[in-house]
């Protein structure tokens, strides 16, 4: 069995940077707070908790002088003002690519364009972007775009992890409705590279494993893209979820991972698949299952 791992699998530059900033801050202060999970990966979050990073959802628990990390998704100016008023030390790990989207929506508003953000309205990055302008529209489906009335002007940006095919389709439909359309493609290159590699790899292999948190928007998109071209695509958070039966008659296994999946989680999956394969080559499926069980209990 051959295992092919996508070159781009794992942490993107912005997530790597945010994790480094957070680890640096905790090594200086001993205890720091982070607004929401730093990245959408439970296992990496557990590791960071052990270092002294406290993840909170409620700003009210913070006290004057505490250090608080803004994660790579960014926040609205209102949140920053509130934290400053509370006398907190702010460590800003917002990804510079997300900051660029903040600037673009403000520019569009200044130029008089009603602003449309393409993306998931519940995602923290989109909430943060929306908080930079007065009354943005947020749309996540073609149906919503179809319901828009004819407009004279519209400015568009998108969530950095948006699916490129959806973006193309959305802009095409908008162009038929809006007289003066100004579009910024704010899909981050890390996202588009991961998406196109996932598609390419999924077309070459028998089985695709997409590794990453179920709450990770970019991992879920990689899974959807892979599944659309290869029905034997599986979204897993860790090696424990792998089912041996997925690999029946498979010659080539493809593995990719979202931008918030640490390298060590990917390596665990790769080594585990290798181990399963070794067992299969030695004595058939029965031995494979035993090895798999041992592997799990020894964790
Ligand atoms: Fe930044 Fe792009 Fe990663 S926006 S956090 S480098 S996916």
Image (cartoon, grey):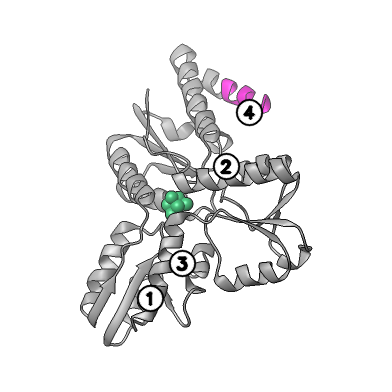
Q: Which residue is mark 3?
A: 120
Find the distance from the CA under tag 1 to the CA under tag 3: 12 Å
Left or right, 172 with respect to 194, comes to left
In magenta, the rendered stretch is: 290-299
Percent across and percent down for residue 17 are 52, 45
Q: Which residue is mark 4?
A: 296
Q: Nearer the viewer, residue 34 or 204?
A: 34
**Residue at disc 2, secondary structure:** helix
Percent across and percent down for residue 16 are 51, 43
**Quadrant position of residue 139:** bottom left
Whether the magenta-drawn stretch holds residue 283 is answered as no
Categorize mark 1 by other alpha carbons within 10 Å: few (<14), some (14-19), many (20+): many
* Image quarter (top left, top right, bottom left or bottom right) of the C terminus: top right
**Residue at disc 4, secondary structure:** helix
* Image quarter (top left, top right, bottom left or bottom right) of the N terminus: top left
Q: Which residue is mark 1?
A: 116
Find the distance from the CA under tag 1 to the CA under tag 4: 47 Å
Find the distance from the CA under tag 4 to the CA under tag 3: 36 Å
**Residue at disc 3, secondary structure:** loop
Camera-nearest label, 1 or 4: 1
Find the distance from the CA under tag 3 to the CA under tag 2: 27 Å
Find the distance from the CA under tag 2 to the CA under tag 4: 30 Å
- The correct choice, above or below, for 66 with respect to 17 in the image is below
């Amino acid at each position: 069995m051959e295992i092919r791992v996508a070159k781009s699998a794992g942490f993107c530059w912005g997530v790597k940077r945010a994790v480094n900033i957070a680890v640096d801050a905790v090594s200086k202060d001993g205890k720091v707070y982070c607004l929401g999970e730093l990245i959408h990966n439970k296992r990496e979050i557990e590791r960071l908790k052990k270092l002294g990073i406290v993840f909170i959802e409620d700003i009210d628990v913070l006290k004057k002088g505490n250090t608080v990390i803004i994660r790579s998704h960014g926040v609205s100016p209102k949140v920053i003002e509130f934290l400053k008023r509370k006398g907190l030390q702010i460590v800003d790990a917002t990804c510079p690519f997300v900051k660029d989207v903040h600037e673009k929506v403000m520019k569009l508003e200044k130029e008089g364009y009603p602003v449309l953000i393409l993306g998931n309205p519940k995602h923290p990055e989109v909430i943060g972007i929306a908080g930079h302008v007065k009354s943005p529209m947020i749309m996540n489906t073609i149906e919503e775009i179809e319901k828009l009335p004819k407009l004279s002007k519209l400015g568009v940006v998108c969530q950095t992890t948006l699916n490129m095919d959806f973006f193309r389709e959305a802009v095409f439909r908008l162009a038929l409705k809006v007289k003066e359309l100004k579009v910024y493609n704010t899909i981050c290159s890390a996202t588009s590279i991961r998406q196109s590699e996932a598609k390419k790899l999924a077309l070459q292999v028998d089985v695709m494993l997409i590794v990453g948190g179920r709450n990770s928007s970019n991992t879920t998109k990689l899974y959807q893209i892979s599944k659309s071209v290869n029905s034997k695509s599986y979204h897993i958070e860790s090696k424990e979820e792998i089912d041996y039966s997925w690999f029946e008659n498979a010659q080539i296994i493809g593995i990719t991972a979202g931008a918030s999946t640490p390298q060590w989680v990917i390596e665990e999956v790769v080594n585990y698949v290798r181990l399963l394969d070794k067992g299969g080559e030695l004595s058939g499926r029965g031995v494979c299952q035993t090895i798999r069980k041992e592997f799990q209990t020894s964790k």
